[in-house]
Structure formats: structure tokens, C-alpha cells
Image (tube, helix red, strand yellow):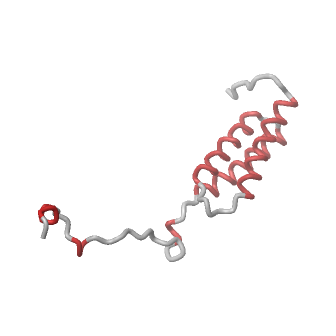
Amino acid sequence: MSTNNMADPRRQNKIFRYKAPSTESNPTMEDPTPDYMNLLGMIFSMCGLMLKLKWCAWIAVYCSFISFANSRSSEDTKQMMSSFMLSISAVVMSYLQNPQPMSPPW
């Protein structure tokens, strides 16, 4: 044996490669945050469009960003992009109808 192998304190029979738990066998591992944020973003963007509330439109953009940041790469991006575009359109339409700066709600 070499001197390098003698100084190594690791035991080769105790080393195991990490395997990530699959979400199919354990559905509680799946994070529902992107779905909730996507739904909240759509609700707030509809409120921003219909009620012309600028703060609702900005909250919709914020929720869409959170949904995009927390989503997995394997998820379908069509719904997320439609929510993001809906929130952007709510901001644009609310400022096109009333270009004044947003007043605080209080």
C-alpha cells in the first residue's frame, strides 16, 4: 500500500452515491408554490385589468416572477408565460388609461 492510501481516513465500503428521491413515489415532495403564485398572479392581473387598480397589476407581476423563479425546468411553460404576459398587459393597460403615478392605497 502507498503512504497516500494509508493517510486517507475514508472507508471505501461506506461511500454511497446520492440519489434524489423521486416525486412519483412521494407526492409530498412536490412544491405547490409556483402553482399558487401563478393562480394569484392571474387573479391580481384580472383585478388590475377590470378594476383599473395599478397596485393589483404590480402584485400580479411580482407573483409571476415568483412563479417563474420557483418552477422546475421540466414543467410546462405555456401557462406560466401566459400568466406573465397577462400581468404585463395589466400594468400596461392600467398606465395607458391613467398615466398618473400610482397613489398609495391608504
Q: Furthest-right residue in view?
A: 97
The foreground one among 79 and 45 is 79
Q: Position of residue 21 (x, y in %)?
A: 45, 71
Residue displayed at 50% across by 68% down: 28
Residue displayed at 62% across by 63% down: 74
Does residue 31 lie above or below 95 as drawn?
below
Q: Furthest-top residue in view?
A: 100
Does residue 74 lie above or below 68 as drawn?
below
Q: Position of residue 11 (x, y in %)?
A: 20, 70
* Quarter of the image that includes the N terminus: bottom left
The quadrant in which residue 73 appears is bottom right
Q: Is residue 82 left or right of residue 10?
A: right
Residue displayed at 16% across by 65% down: 5
Q: Position of residue 36 (x, y in %)?
A: 63, 55
* Quarter of the image that includes the C terminus: top right
Does residue 54 lie above or below 34 as drawn?
above
Counting every numbered tag in the picture gives 0
Residue displayed at 50% across by 66% down: 29
Q: Is residue 95 left or right of residue 20?
A: right
Q: Position of residue 55 (x, y in %)?
A: 72, 34
Q: Is residue 72 left or right of residue 64?
A: left
Does residue 52 lie above or below 104 as drawn?
below
The quadrant in which residue 72 appears is bottom right
